[in-house]
């Protein structure tokens, strides 16, 4: 199967960083979730993902498969031309950007709109941090938080939570009084400085508020699940922790998107998508960050139970435009291989796979996010 002609809706990615920020970091930093100097300056260059990617990028840019040659080629092209080439080669129709990653270093959404259609994903915890710094009392803070997301700002197609990173996915109901107490504790610690929100009571309380608003507008809520950088506890990143939230009748109609295939909890994620109508999945980050065999295994395991109407493509690209290209290249290739295997196994017929491929790469996201 050749899926290159299907334009992609990248339903979860991140803004590129400014050129001066990119050149200040090792190139290998874009190819790892680690941030320790030993990782980004040495070990990251010895992953299968980095070594495969170096050859692919060099072939794409028509230079030698060495990091120095790639960096020289990138510099000669400039960021705008490189981005244009990567987005075009990826055949992207639209990207949905979570602009809450490294907000002080990124290029604005308007910069990305020079190349294609862009929609915004609003990161809830970042919004809360910004409002805490500006507000002295909890009642005003909560009123401001709700006003910022109800109605959702223009161009926002989803909310996103990184509760997984901060306190884990076992989201609990929290009383107004407990959340207020946490707010004032944070204010005493940070005063008028922008805090890093790590208080479980306040995070869970605000997430419940946001879910009620998402229900009101039928707006999808994306959750980071599975692996990421060392900031998270991987044991608390298992999406099975979300069961009590998924069982709550008041959130029954809120679309919940489990990001990153919940790696290494793929089968658990697939199970949730198979039994809860509101649960959807994507396989960004694991594609293209894993080995080829690993990527193939993840997508295959997701489809063991997941309805094909509930699986979506994303790249989780960030920092550099090459990750958009690599995600699209391997997203299409791995999906094609898994669907071809499904034909051989008699799970699917030849007449079915083209529609399924289009659904996963594009149509499911269009329907879920009501994109037009």
Image (tube, helix red, strand yellow):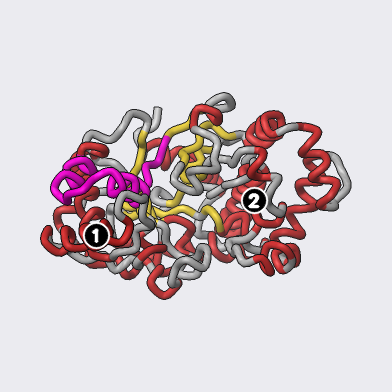
Q: In the rendered view, would you say 118 is above or below 284?
A: above
Q: Where does the image place residue 240, in percent across and percent down from the top left?
A: 33, 69
User: Which segment is the magenta one?
Assistant: 120-146
Question: Within the image, what quadrant is residue 134 found in?
Answer: top left
Q: Is residue 216 magenta?
A: no
Secondary structure type for disc 1: helix
Q: In the rendered view, would you say 148 is above or below 360?
A: above
Q: Where does the image place residue 341, in percent across and percent down from the top left?
A: 60, 59
| Mark 1 crowdedness (10 Å alpha carbons): few <14, some 14-19, many ≥20 | many
Outermost residue toward the top?
114
Front-lying residue, 198 or 244: 198
Front-lying residue, 300 or 81: 81
Residue in the picture at 38% in, 57% down = 196
Q: Earlier in the sequence, mark 2 or mark 1?
A: 1
Q: Where does the image place residue 160, in percent across and percent down from the top left?
A: 36, 49
For residue 340, say whether it is visible. no
Front-lying residue, 354 or 175: 175
Outermost residue toward the bottom?
235
For residue 103, say whether it is visible. yes
| Mark 2 crowdedness (10 Å alpha carbons): few <14, some 14-19, many ≥20 | some
Residue in the picture at 34% in, 67% down = 167
In the image, is 192 to the left or to the right of 80? left
Q: In the rendered view, would you say 149 is above or below 233?
A: above
In the image, is 46 to the left or to the right of 307? right
Q: Nearer the viewer, mark 2 or mark 1?
A: 1
Q: CA distance from mark 2 to mark 1?
A: 39 Å
Question: Within the image, what quadrant is residue 289 found in?
Answer: bottom right
Secondary structure type for disc 2: helix
Q: Which mark is residue 202?
A: 1
In the image, is 177 to the left or to the right of 98? left
Residue in the picture at 81% in, 52% down = 67
Q: Which mark is residue 330?
A: 2
């Amino acid at each position: 199967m050749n899926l290159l002609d299907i334009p992609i809706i990248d339903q979860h990615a991140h803004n590129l960083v400014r050129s001066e920020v990119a050149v200040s970091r090792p190139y290998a930093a874009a190819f790892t979730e680690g941030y320790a100097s030993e990782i980004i300056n040495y070990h990251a260059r010895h992953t299968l993902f980095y070594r495969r990617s170096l050859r692919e990028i060099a072939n794409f840019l028509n230079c030698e498969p060495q990091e120095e040659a790639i960096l020289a080629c990138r510099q000669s092209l400039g960021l705008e031309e490189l981005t244009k080439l990567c987005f075009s080669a990826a055949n992207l129709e639209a990207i949905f950007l979570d602009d809450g990653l490294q907000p002080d270093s990124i290029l604005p959404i308007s910069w990305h709109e020079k190349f294609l259609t862009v929609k915004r994903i609003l990161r809830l915890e970042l919004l809360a941090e910004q409002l805490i710094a500006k507000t002295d009392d909890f009642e005003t803070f909560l009123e401001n938080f709700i006003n910022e997301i109800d109605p959702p700002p223009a161009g926002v197609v989803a909310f996103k939570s990184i509760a997984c990173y901060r306190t884990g996915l076992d989201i609990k109901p929290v009383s107004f009084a407990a959340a207020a107490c946490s707010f004032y504790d944070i204010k005493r610690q940070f005063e008028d400085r922008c805090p890093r929100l790590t208080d479980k009571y306040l995070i869970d309380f605000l997430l419940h508020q946001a879910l009620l608003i998402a229900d009101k507008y039928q707006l999808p809520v994306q959750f980071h699940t599975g692996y990421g950088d060392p900031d998270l506890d991987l044991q608390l990143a298992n999406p099975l922790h979300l069961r009590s939230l998924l069982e709550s009748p008041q959130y029954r109609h809120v679309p919940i998107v489990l990001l990153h295939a919940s790696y290494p909890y793929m089968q658990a994620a697939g199970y949730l998508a198979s039994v809860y109508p509101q649960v959807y999945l994507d396989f960004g980050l694991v594609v293209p960050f894993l080995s080829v065999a690993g990527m193939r295994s993840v997508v295959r395991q997701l489809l063991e139970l997941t309805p094909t109407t509930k699986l979506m493509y994303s790249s989780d690209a960030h920092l550099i435009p090459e990750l958009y290209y690599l995600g699209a290249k391997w997203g299409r290739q791995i999906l094609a291989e898994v669907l071809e295997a499904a034909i051989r196994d008699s799970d699917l017929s030849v007449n079915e796979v083209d529609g399924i491929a289009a659904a996963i790469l594009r149509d499911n996201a269009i329907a879920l996010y009501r994109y037009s």
